[in-house]
Image (cartoon, rainbow, N blue to C red):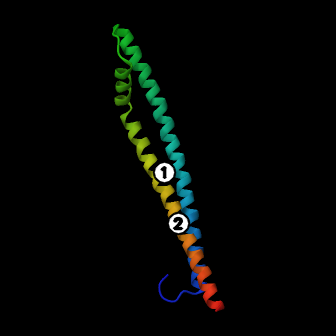
Amino acid sequence: MSGVVTPASVEARLVALSKQLDEAHGELVDAERSFFDAKGDYEIAIAAARMREGARAADKGVKVTVQEREDAALLATAEQLKRLYVAEAVVRASRANVARLRTQVDIARSVGTSVRTAMDL
């Protein structure tokens, strides 16, 4: 909003922000869904990898430490973990965008109140 601010320009900005906020909320819902899909995939994959590693060690008659078993499972599920981290980053960015838009709505409301007050003077 540059130049002369009118109630109509404030209203137009609020309408535009409302649309952007709706879109951002939809993106956040999609990001959350992707995150939980990735999280579920990772948790299932890591559990399966732990079981395979335990069975492999037992078949060989080798004792492995819990840490060795965890490390082997982590290496076996590296791609799922990377997808989980990317999905988490998208969720965080989506949440930040929603918060940014809400802040802009608050600012536009304050400007609208100031404009109305100034017009009453």
Q: Name the residue under label 2.
A: 101
Total numbered labels placed on residues in the image: 2
Q: Mark 1 points at which residue?
A: 91
| Point 62% across, 80% down: residue | 113
Badge 2 vs badge 1, beta-carbon distance below 8 Å? no
Q: Which structural element holds mark 2?
A: helix
Direction bottom: furthest residue: 121
Residue type, label 2: Leu
Vertical placement of residue 47 versus 39, above or below: above
Q: In this view, does 26 lie to the left or right of 64?
A: right
Task: Say which quarter of the image contains residue 120.
Answer: bottom right
Residue type, label 1: Val
| Point 58% across, 69% down: residue | 19
Q: Which structural element holds mark 1?
A: helix
Estimate the x, y position of residue 87 in percent, counting from the top left: 45, 46
| Point 45% across, 30% down: residue | 45
Q: In this view, does 77 lie to the left or right of 91?
A: left
Vertical placement of residue 8 versus 52, above or below: below
Direction front: furthest residue: 121
Mark 2 to mark 1: distance in Å?
15 Å
Vertical placement of residue 58 versus 75, above or below: above
